[in-house]
Amino acid sequence: MYIIKRMLLVSVFTFMSTTENVSSLTPVTHIESAADSQLDPAVRLNPPTPVELGFNPEHLTGCEEMDWYRKYAGLPTVFDSLGYRESRCNNDVRTYCCYGYWQNYLESHLSVKSAYRERIINECGVREISDIFGNSDNQKYKQACVTFVVYSISGLAPWKI
């Protein structure tokens, strides 16, 4: 290994010492071969999903922001008062079991036997708690989407005291 490294260094120094006028060197450009002209352009099969989806264009905060996500998801106005009761309009609130504006019990909702599981995964793209719990626009939208799925299947029963 030592001999190979030594030979490489000697050849590099030899090249550098024989190249006296660097400015006279021409830059290497792409040389198109026959194979290049026959290639089709690359097509991305699995494009990346955007991190932020551009929700909340008015940059609202607090209860006004939660109200915006409620309306966007198609939830009735009763979820304004439920969101205030459950989280004081904060999506980064966690209780013993539940997360976000409307305190969704995601471990239960995503369990294998849950009536909500398939729709939450397919319609909302939610597979874990970090998808709905936090302060990014995407997390807030997914919180509202999960709430809509649960509401459309069970009504207000999950939020009754």
Image (spheres, rainbow, N blue to C red):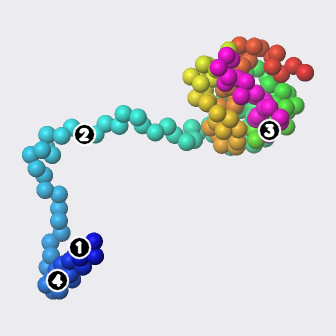
The reply to whether discs 4 and 3 touch (Cβ–Cβ < 8 Å) is no
In the visual, does 84 lie left or right of 72?
A: right
Dots 2, 4 in contact, CB < 8 A: no
- Tell me how far mark 1 sits from mark 2, CA to CA: 40 Å
Q: Which mark is residue 94?
A: 3
Q: Are marks 1 and 2 in contact (CB under 8 Å)?
A: no
- Which mark is first along the chain, 1 or 4? 1
Q: How many dots with numbers?
A: 4
Residue wearing tag 2: 41
Using the image as rendered, state which of residue 28 and residue 3 is in the foreground.
3
Q: What is the quadrant of residue 141 in the picture?
A: top right
Q: Main secondary structure of the magenta part?
A: loop
Between residue 81 and residue 125, name the one nearer to us. Answer: 125
Element on which disc 3 rests: loop
Report the amino acid beneath label 2: Pro
Q: Mark 2 Cα within 10 Å, few/some/many (few <14, many 20+)?
A: few
Q: Residue at x 70, y 42 (%)?
A: 134
Q: Position of residue 64 (x, y in %)?
A: 77, 36
Of tags 4 and 1, the one toward the viewer is 1
* Marks 2 and 3, the one that precedes in the sequence: 2
The type of residue carrying mark 1 is: Ile
Disc number lying in front (4 or 3): 4
Determine which residue is flagged by label 4.
Answer: 14
Going by the numbered disc 4, the residue's amino acid type is Thr
How far separated are the C-alphas under marks 4 and 3?
A: 67 Å
Name the residue rendered at 80%, 38% in the picture: 94
Q: Is residue 113 magenta?
A: yes
